[in-house]
Image (spheres, grey):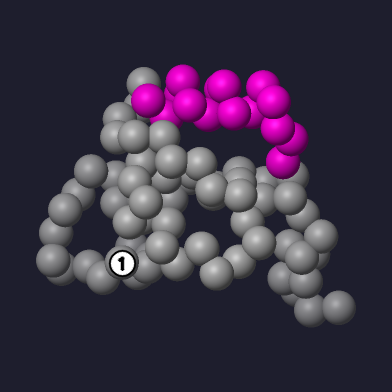
Amino acid sequence: MKAFDIFVFMKILIVAATQKEVSLFKKHDIDILITGAGIPNTVLSLTKHLSNHNYDLAINVGIGGVFHDKYDIGEVV
């Protein structure tokens, strides 16, 4: 078993404010939650979603409100 093979067996949720931020994940069998921009939207959407769904791992991804040409989508900073 390789180091990251465990993720194959996990139910994973990717959380982001916009569709554009999750474009890299759409090829995989991962649930995606689009919340809208801002902390209040994320808290409300995620709370509602998690009250009806269970996950082994939830990952919040996105640009953090920074729209800048310096970084490419998918680049880790």
The image shows residue 22, relative to residue 8, as above or below, that is above
With 44 as the anchor, is 37 left or right in this view?
left
Residue 40 spot, x, y in % from top left:
36, 21
Left or right of 76 on screen, residue 8: right
Query: Where residue 61 appears, x then y in whole percent?
Result: 43, 50
User: In the image shown, does 18 or 5 lie closer to the viewer?
Assistant: 18
When the figure is inspected, residue 10 is found, relative to residue 73, above or below; the finding is above
Residue at 63% over, 56% down: 30
Q: Nearer the viewer, residue 30 or 5?
A: 30
Residue displayed at 54% across by 48% down = 32
Q: Residue at x 79, y 79 (%)?
A: 2
Is 25 drawn above or below residue 39 in the view shown?
A: below
Please rate how many residues cluster around mark 1, counting C-alpha atoms within 10 Å: few if below 14, some from 14 to 19, many from 20. few
The one of 46 and 1 positioned closer to us in this rendering: 46
Dominant SS type (magenta): helix
Q: Secondary structure at mark 1?
A: loop
Q: Is residue 72 magenta?
A: no
Quadrant, the N terminus: bottom right
In the rendered image, the residue lying farthest to the left is 69
Question: Which residue corresponds to mark 1?
Answer: 73
- Quadrant holding the C terminus: bottom left
Amino acid marked by disc 1:
Ile
Q: Residue furthest right?
A: 1
Kindly identify the residue that appears in the image at 43 percent across and 41 percent down: 34
Point out the stretch of residues depicted in magenta. Answer: 41-55
Q: Position of residue 14 (x, y in %)?
A: 54, 49
As drawn, the residue found furthest toward the bottom would be 2
Quarter of the figure with residue 70: bottom left
